Amino acid sequence: MHKLCMHLTNYAINKDNENFVQNNSEDILAGEGSKRHLDWFRKHLVEEGHDDEQLFQEIEQLIVKTLLSVQPSLAH
């Protein structure tokens, strides 16, 4: 946690960090550089012993429930 910029997901901020590594298209799929492809992330989850299908289903359910909870306000 002492490397605060390492954990930033906002590209506009992170790109100005001295440790930022610009990716090319091959790097993104290989997990190199400062960006990662979603396919790489899912493969990484599986390699770490996580069920990526279940995780993404739970994320989908969370998104649906969030949208349902704000729907009355949006319709108003």
Image (tube, helix red, strand yellow):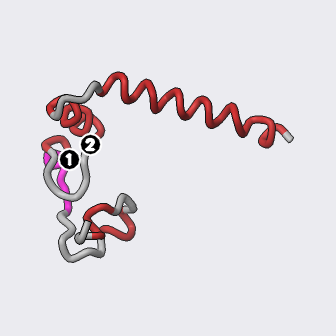
Dot 1 alpha-carbon crowd within 10 angstroms: few under 14, some 14 to 19, many 20 or more: some
Relative image position of residue 18 (x, y in whole percent): 20, 77
Residue at numbered disc 2: 37
Dot 2 alpha-carbon crowd within 10 angstroms: few under 14, some 14 to 19, many 20 or more: some
Q: Earlier in the sequence, mark 1 or mark 2?
A: 1
The image quadrant of residue 43 is: top left
Residue 75, labelled with which disc? none
Query: Considering only vertical position in the picture, is 23 above or below 49?
Result: below
Tell me, yes or no, whether the two marked residues, 1 and 2, touch with CB atoms within 8 Å: yes
Say which of 30 and 73 sits in front: 73
- How many labels were placed on the picture? 2
Relative image position of residue 44 (x, y in whole percent): 19, 36
Amino acid type at image mark 1: Ile
Q: Which segment is the magenta one?
A: 22-27
Residue at numbered disc 1: 28
Q: Quadrant of the N terminus?
A: bottom left
Secondary element at tag 2: loop
The image quadrant of residue 38 is: top left
Residue found 28% across the figure and 25% down from its top: 51
Residue 61 relative to residue 39: left or right: right
In the picture as drawn, the residue positioned furthest to the right comes out as 76
The image quadrant of residue 4 is: bottom left
Residue found 25% across the figure and 39% down from its top: 41
Relative image position of residue 30 (x, y in whole percent): 13, 43
Residue 70 relative to residue 37: left or right: right
Secondary element at tag 1: helix
Residue found 26% across the figure and 33% down from its top: 42
Amino acid type at image mark 2: His
Q: Is residue 25 magenta?
A: yes
Residue found 17% across the figure and 64% down from its top: 21
